[in-house]
């Protein structure tokens, strides 16, 4: 095939010959503009395969080649030479996005370049909405490409285009097969790999794909692991790529930062993004993710600086619009924020982050119907976006529709099984539906995987209270208090006072005066429990004056020392619940 020279690659994970890899990257960087019109579109693979920008970035991360080893420029065929003037004219129109005009001047050309332009003209003619084909040329194009595919006349770029047409027609299985074939024919065509990423829904599906044995497969696996929230595997892959010689690659550094963002290691992600900005100060790609981190940490000056900086670089990029939207959202100007997310979607209707963020803004404005529409659009773009599923669950929770909530929270949990927020939300749904056994399992599981909001144990304790399981409730409250104090957090949480109040009353009922007195004294430190704490202390003093002694008949299964040190752990913990019978 025409791309055979670029298609040849080293084996999977074989980075022993970095000079050969660099030659391939330089060859792609030189060839791609000629083959596909020279434009790498923001937020998508475009038609340039491993785009000149991406190939150049990876090549820059490797050691330079001597002059004698630089790859020669690609040769032109007789047909290419004959059509060169028409091709050059059409390319200029293509770069100006005048696709019909470009196709018109290519009508008499015979070279394969004409075919690439005409196909791309069909693909860019209009968006495809669910259930309605606006681009009438797609069906016609599918028939034409199907014939060429059966006759084995499509090269790597043609196969990629055929796959995109099938994907837009919702023929997912056929599209996956064609993208895999495109990756075999042209392994350096990153667009085919990215399309595969969007169609693969889980790790099991990935195992059954027959992928080409090339070094590009390692980049693909690292990317798909990040998309599937398999962050540990993704970080291992990226580390192996760094060790192989790509330590200076800003692409890999940015992907590692995104991975840490996905597991909510905010400090680590911020540190990497700040280092990335020093290495590549004019970078726009992934800066919307950086702005999400600044938003979460309420770093208003830093977010303002980032927004102004990106505006100076290019204010018409989707990432820039999202950063500005986040800035206005942090200032609680939600109408302006939604406007900038809408601008981002006008630039790229398939930009996932903008749909999700716009849904969040509509939620802030109490416009639930618009929020639902935005989240649904996000799911249409990428069914693996747990934030959209979670957002839909929250929206239906506001609408007091718990069965709908349960469905959407379950989908979010399937995508993020170790995210405590999804499990707590599921537990609340089960509780509203009076399925208390399932609710208890969700709360315990949320605590077991690492409760980021420190609410799972409190909710579990209250559930035990509701079921009159006082001992289990007390155990949950004790562990909750120890977790809060061991983290060194400022105790301003209302639930801390609630925990001390319950424990004081529990110990009082058990006639354990010392423990009850210690908890009552802690209650006096909080405004909402101060009076109850003082009243309980007076009762304990009165009973002691009357000669009442601490009970020795009731075995104290645990105790709460005033120091709350790490060594004073309760002697019995809450028993782990059997999670095998019910999967939230």
Image (cartoon, rainbow, N blue to C red):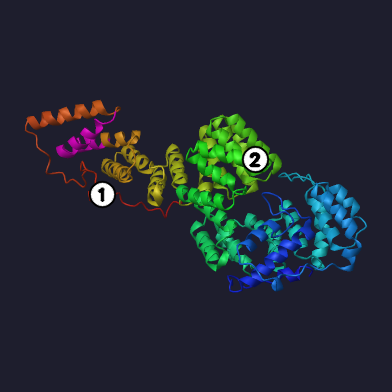
Q: Residues within 10 Å of mark 2 (few under 14, many from 20)?
A: few
Q: Are marks 2 and 1 in contact (CB under 8 Å)?
A: no
Residue at image mark 1: 566
Q: Which residues are magenta?
A: 502-526
Determine the residue positioned at 65% across, 40% down. 312
| Residue 208 can be seen in this image | no
Residue at image mark 2: 312
| Residue 428, x across and y down, in percent | 44, 39
Determine the residue positioned at 42% across, 55% down. 580
- Farthest-out residue, right: 108
| Residue 101, x across and y down, in percent | 87, 48
- Residue 251 found in image quarter: bottom right
Answer whether residue 418 is magenta in the image: no
Above/below status of 472 relative to 180: above
| Residue 59, x across and y down, in percent | 64, 63
Considering depth in this image, is 242 or 124 the residue closer to the camera? 242
Nearer mark to the viewer, of 2 and 1 = 2
Q: Main secondary structure of the magenta part?
A: helix
Tell me which label, 2 or 1, sits earlier in the chain: 2
Considering depth in this image, is 181 or 405 the residue closer to the camera? 181
As drawn, is 142 to the left or to the right of 549?
A: right
Above/below status of 554 relative to 116: above
Q: Which mark is residue 17?
A: none
Determine the residue positioned at 33% across, 41% down. 461
Q: How many marks?
A: 2
| Residue 447 can be seen in this image | yes
Q: Residues within 10 Å of mark 1 (few under 14, many from 20)?
A: few
- Residue 2 found in image quarter: bottom right
- Farthest-out residue, front: 67
| Residue 395, x across and y down, in percent | 54, 36
As drawn, is 557 to the left or to the right of 20?
A: left
As drawn, is 20 to the left or to the right of 425?
A: right
């Amino acid at each position: 095939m025409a791309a055979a020279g670029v298609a040849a690659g080293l084996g999977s994970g074989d980075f022993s010959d970095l000079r050969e890899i660099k030659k391939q990257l330089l060859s792609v960087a030189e060839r791609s503009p000629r083959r596909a019109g020279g434009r790498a579109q923001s937020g998508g693979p475009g038609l340039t395969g491993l785009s000149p920008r991406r190939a150049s970035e990876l090549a820059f991360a490797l050691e330079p080649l001597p002059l004698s080893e630089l790859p020669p420029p690609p040769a032109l065929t007789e047909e290419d030479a004959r059509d060169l003037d028409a091709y050059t004219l059409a390319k200029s129109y293509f770069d100006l996005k005048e696709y019909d005009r470009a196709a018109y001047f290519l009508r008499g050309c015979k070279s394969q370049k004409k075919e690439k332009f005409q196909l791309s003209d069909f693909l860019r003619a209009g968006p495809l909405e669910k259930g309605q084909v606006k681009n009438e040329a797609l069906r016609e194009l599918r028939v034409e490409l199907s014939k060429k595919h059966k006759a084995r006349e499509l090269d790597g770029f043609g196969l990629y285009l055929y796959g995109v047409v099938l994907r837009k027609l919702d023929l997912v299985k056929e599209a996956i097969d064609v993208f895999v074939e495109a990756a075999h024919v042209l392994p350096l065509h990153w667009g085919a790999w990215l399309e595969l990423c969007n169609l693969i829904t889980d790790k099991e599906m990935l195992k059954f794909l027959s992928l080409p044995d090339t070094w590009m497969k390692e980049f693909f696996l690292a990317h798909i692991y990040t998309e599937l929230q398999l962050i540990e595997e993704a970080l291992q892959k990226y580390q192996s790529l760094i060790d192989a010689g790509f330590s200076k690659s800003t692409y890999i550094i940015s992907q590692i930062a995104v991975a840490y963002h996905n597991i909510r290691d905010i400090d680590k992600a911020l540190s990497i993004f700040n280092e990335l900005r020093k290495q590549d100060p004019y970078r726009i790609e992934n800066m919307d993710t950086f702005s999400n981190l600044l938003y979460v940490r309420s770093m208003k000056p830093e977010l303002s600086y980032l927004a102004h900086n990106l505006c100076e670089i290019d204010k018409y990029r989707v990432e820039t619009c999202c950063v500005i939207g986040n800035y206005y959202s942090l200032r609680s100007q939600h109408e302006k924020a939604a406007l900038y997310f809408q601008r981002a979607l006008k630039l790229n209707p398939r930009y996932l982050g903008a749909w999700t963020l716009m849904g969040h803004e509509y939620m802030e404005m109490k416009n639930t119907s618009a929020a639902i529409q935005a989240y649904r659009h996000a799911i249409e773009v990428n069914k693996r976006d747990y934030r959209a599923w979670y957002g839909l669950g929250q929206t239906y929770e506001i609408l007091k529709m718990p069965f709908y909530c349960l469905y959407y929270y379950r989908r979010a949990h399937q995508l993020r099984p170790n995210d405590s927020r999804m499990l707590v939300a599921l537990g609340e749904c089960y509780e509203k539906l009076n399925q208390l056994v399932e609710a208890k399992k969700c709360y315990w599981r949320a605590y077991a995987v690492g409760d980021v909001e420190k609410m799972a144990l409190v909710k579990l304790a209250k559930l035990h209270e509701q079921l009159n399981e006082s001992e289990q409730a007390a155990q949950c409250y004790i562990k909750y208090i120890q977790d809060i104090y061991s983290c060194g957090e400022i105790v301003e949480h209302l639930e801390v006072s609630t925990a001390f109040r319950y424990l004081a009353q529990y110990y009082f009922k058990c006639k354990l005066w010392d423990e009850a007195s210690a908890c009552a004294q802690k209650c006096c430190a909080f405004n909402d429990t101060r009076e109850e704490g003082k009243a309980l202390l007076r009762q304990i003093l009165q009973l002691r004056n009357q000669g009442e002694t601490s009970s020795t008949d009731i075995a104290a299964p645990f105790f709460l020392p005033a120091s709350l040190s790490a060594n004073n752990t309760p002697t019995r913990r809450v028993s782990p619940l059997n999670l095998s019978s019910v999967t939230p």
